[in-house]
Image: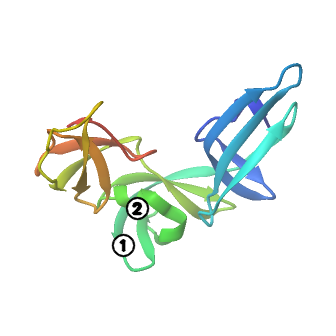
Amino acid sequence: MFNITELKTGAKISLGGEPYEVLSYAQSKMGRGGSVVKVKVKNLKTGATLSKTYQGAEKIDQADLSKKSAQFLYFDNENAYFMDSGTFDQFPLSLMQIGQQKHFLVEGTETDILYYNDQPINVELPIKMKFKVVEAPPGVRGNTAGAATKPVMLETGGKVDTPLFIKVGDIIVVDTRDGKYVERG
């Protein structure tokens, strides 16, 4: 059981018997009243998101999930296929379940697969991963008030905003939780 103050980004909770992951949270305190926490959660089975508000001393159930190591194999039109590292069994996860993480899956990547009731429901990637830049427009300095960025395309087809000095062929490190550039690899 979680208190509302223990809800942090990445926490796995259970709502109505379904597993959810907290994507974002905002805590506020109203005068003498208790804390109010607003969270945005993603259903780990379907990929659907919703917003939820918790107040005071509410308790939230922790999702009963297990993890197993697996290797990403390939995509087709609807699924991503993985191989269990222990049993070598292959299984699919729908692209809807995986969501934006599909932009960070490279063939052969070792991942953790989340299981709920002995069924694979979602993938958990390493927090920081290295990718090769395959497409980058030239960096043009101009009317910029702060740090200037440009969108580049990764080898997986995903797009990331990077500093202007990144060029085609560079290896960059990306935070897979939010898809943001971390550093040059």
Rate crowding at label 1 as few (under 14), some (14 to 19) or many (20 or more) other CA atoms within 10 Å. some
Residue identified by numbered label 1: 75
Report whether 2 appears left or right of 175: right
The quadrant of the picture occupied by the C terminus is: top left
Residue at 40 percent of width and 62 percent of height: 102
Q: Position of residue 5 (x, y in %)?
A: 74, 29
- The numbered disc on residue 102 is 2
Q: Which of 24 and 78 is in front in this view?
A: 24
Residue at horizontal 61 percent and vertical 58 percent from the top: 44
Q: Which colour scheme is used?
A: rainbow
Callout 1, which amino acid? Phe
Q: Which of marks 1 and 2 is nearer the N terminus?
A: 1
112 is higher (above) or lower (below) than 172:
below
At numbered mark 1, what does the secondary structure look like: helix, strand or loop? Answer: strand
Are there few (<14), some (14-19), or many (20+) residues within 10 Å of tag 2? some
Residue 94 seen anywhere in this rendered image of the structure: no
The Cα atoms of the two marked residues, 1 and 2, are separated by 9 Å
Name the image quarter holding residue 127. top left
| Percent coordinates x, y for residue 83 in the rendering | 41, 65
Residue drawn at point x = 69 percent, y = 35 percent: 7
Q: Which of marks 1 and 2 is in front?
A: 2
Seen at 18% across and 40% down, the residue is: 164
Q: Is residue 40 above or below residue 165?
A: below
In the displayed orientation, state which residue is furthest to the bottom. Answer: 77
Residue 155 showing in the rendered view: yes
Residue 101, image x and y in percent?
Answer: 43, 57
- The kind of secondary structure element at disc 2 is helix
Residue found at the very far top of the displayed protein: 32
154 over 24 or under it: above or below: below
88 left or right, relative to 64? left
